[in-house]
Amino acid sequence: MEIITDAFVGGQGFGSVAEKLLANNCDPNALRNNTVLLTDEWKVFDRAVLKAQESRLNAVADLMTRGLVMPTGTGLAQTVFESQKSSDMADAEVSMDGETRGRNDRITFGIDNLPLPIIHKDFDLSVRTLNMSRRYGQPLDVSQAEIAGRKNAETQEEMLMNGYAYQFNASTIYGYTNHPSRNLYDITDWNGSAFTPEIGLTQILGMKQMALDDDHLGPFVLYLPTDYETVIGEDYKSASDKAFRTRLLEIDQLVEIKVSSKLADNNIVLVEMQSETARMIEAQPLVTVQWETQGGMKTNFKVLAINIPQVRANKDGKMGLVHGGIGIA
């Protein structure tokens, strides 16, 4: 998956693609027209891309379906998202007459700068292939569009789970497993011979308590690596009709357990589903754009989105994210 930060070189636009973007305030929809693809053909490609996205978005979808998303509406024009993080205040005063002078208090603020790179995957279509489809009624092959949509979604998931080794203007994209303020909790190997579901329950309760101690009360989603999927399906106790997963979901405010292919073995993550902990910054929703090359003989497509995770702590470094691992703390 390729990531780019700017549609232009040195602030200058070159060629018809850049000219269209500059003339339309960097709105990529300016690169969607019916000069090559007809409306129904666009629908075929768009359905393929969206279907692939939906099948691969897991943790990202957990945030977006809960409304934990900040749409900026800036398209490709914005390269950095700036936000504030604040400290807490002292407790409220208690008195009978309300005349007792309280302590003056003031929130202090810090600034977070989040890079907004473009996540994109490209493919192309020859004019001969398009002509064959129209002339002989052969369905358009959308396999390239599906793969492009899947690759785009997988990169979004990777960013949210593990951050992305990418910096712009001294700013970094952090994820659930590399945010510097995340709470760290030691776990045992859930596939080890000494492990029991009772031990696992104690560890998840301990992770939840770390979030509570940071004044983050949930609701929570627990993410597990693929090598723990079998474990949580086993009986909680011998001769029990209750699975380990079922017992975990009886923990107050633990609303879901998900398996993530983007989590490394022996890593588990407990995330509060609140915007103070994590949200997606959506500068540009998923879109497929086109342009022509080689004298019009080839049509190039780019499936792109600017949907970047913002994992957050307050100014005091407290947050509703707990990362469990073997010897991690």
Image: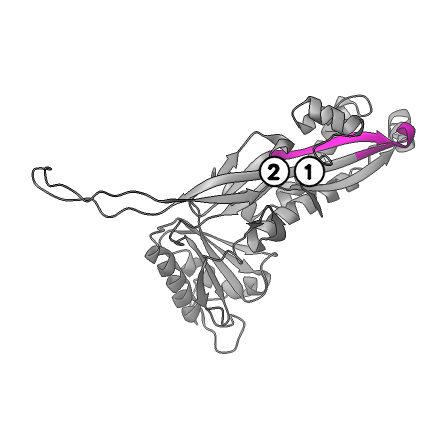
**Residue under the point 78% across and 35% down:** 301
Per the rendering, the mark at residue 273 is none
> Which secondary structure lies at badge 2?
loop
Per the rendering, the mark at residue 79 is 2
> Which secondary structure lies at badge 1?
loop
Q: Is residue 56 visible?
A: no
Specify whether residue 288 is painted magenta: yes
Residue 146: give x, y in percent of width and height. Answer: 73, 41
Residue 83: give x, y in percent of width and height. Answer: 47, 40
Q: Specify whether 117 is left or right of 86.
A: right
Q: Specify whether 87 is left or right of 154.
A: left
Q: Which residue is mark 1?
A: 6
Q: Amino acid at mark 1?
A: Asp
Q: Amino acid at mark 2?
A: Thr
Q: Is residue 44 visible?
A: yes
> Foreground: 302 or 58?
302
Residue 283: give x, y in percent of width and height. Answer: 58, 34
Q: Is residue 181 above or below residue 62?
A: below
- Magenta-highlighted residues: 284-300
Which quadrant holds residue 292? top right
Residue 257: give x, y in percent of width and height. Answer: 49, 54
Dot 1 or dot 2, earlier in sequence: 1
- Label 1 to label 2, Cα distance in Å? 7 Å
